[in-house]
């Protein structure tokens, strides 16, 4: 085999490897983009859940305060009836 044929064969091998790596790189980029999109969606859902939790916590505290007021009024009424 002459030198040019050997170089041509090696060049063809390198070009094939390059094309495979290029294809693999494109697939990895697509995969990364999909994962980044999924992560962004999860982060958004997490933020919405945190906001909802804060709202529920505030509402829970308001309900607790109302219940305490009602219980205090009932105590006052009970004390008024006892005397």
Image (tube, rainbow, N blue to C red):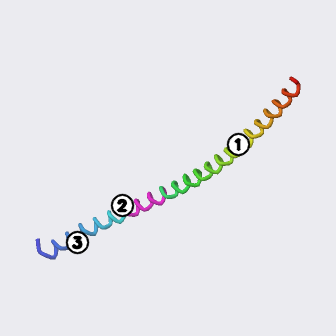
How many marks can you see?
A: 3
Q: Looking at the image, which residue is at 84% across and 31% down?
A: 76
Furthest residue in direction bottom, as rendered: 4
Question: On the image, numbered disc 1 is attached to which residue?
Answer: 61
Q: Give the vertical position of 28 relative to 60 (above or below).
A: below
Between residue 33 and residue 64, name the one nearer to us.
64
Mark 3 element type: helix
Magenta stretch: dominant secondary structure: helix
The part of the image, by quadrant, that contains residue 9 is bottom left
Q: Earlier in the sequence, mark 2 or mark 3?
A: 3
Query: For the N terminus, which image quadrant?
Result: bottom left
Label 2–label 1 contact, CB within 8 A: no
> In the visual, does 14 lie left or right of 45?
left
The stretch of residues the image draws in magenta is: 24-34
Between residue 68 and residue 17, name the one nearer to us.
68
Question: On the image, numbered disc 2 is attached to which residue?
Answer: 24
Q: Give the vertical position of 35 relative to 13 (above or below).
A: above
Furthest residue in direction left, as rendered: 1
Q: Position of residue 50 (x, y in %)?
A: 61, 49
The part of the image, by quadrant, that contains residue 79 is top right
Mark 2 element type: helix
> In the visual, does 27 lie left or right of 58?
left
Label 2 to label 3: alpha-carbon separation = 20 Å
Q: Nearer the viewer, mark 2 or mark 1?
A: 1
Question: On the image, numbered disc 3 is attached to which residue?
Answer: 11
Q: Nearer the viewer, mark 3 or mark 1?
A: 1
Q: Looking at the image, which residue is at 78% across and 32% down?
A: 71
Q: Position of residue 40 (x, y in %)?
A: 54, 57
Label 2 to label 1: alpha-carbon separation = 55 Å
Asked if the stretch drawn in magenta spans residue 4, the answer is no
Label 1: few (<14), some (14–19) or many (≥20) C-alpha neighbours in 10 Å: few
Q: Looking at the image, which residue is at 79% across and 34% down?
A: 72
């Amino acid at each position: 085999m002459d030198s040019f044929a050997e170089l041509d064969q090696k060049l063809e091998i390198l070009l094939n490897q390059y094309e495979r790596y290029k294809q693999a790189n494109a697939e990895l980029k697509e995969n990364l983009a999909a994962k980044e999109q999924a992560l962004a969606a999860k982060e958004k859902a997490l933020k919405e859940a945190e906001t909802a939790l804060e709202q529920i916590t505030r509402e829970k505290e308001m309900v607790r305060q109302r219940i305490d007021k009602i219980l205090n009024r009932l105590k006052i009424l009970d004390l008024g009836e006892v005397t």
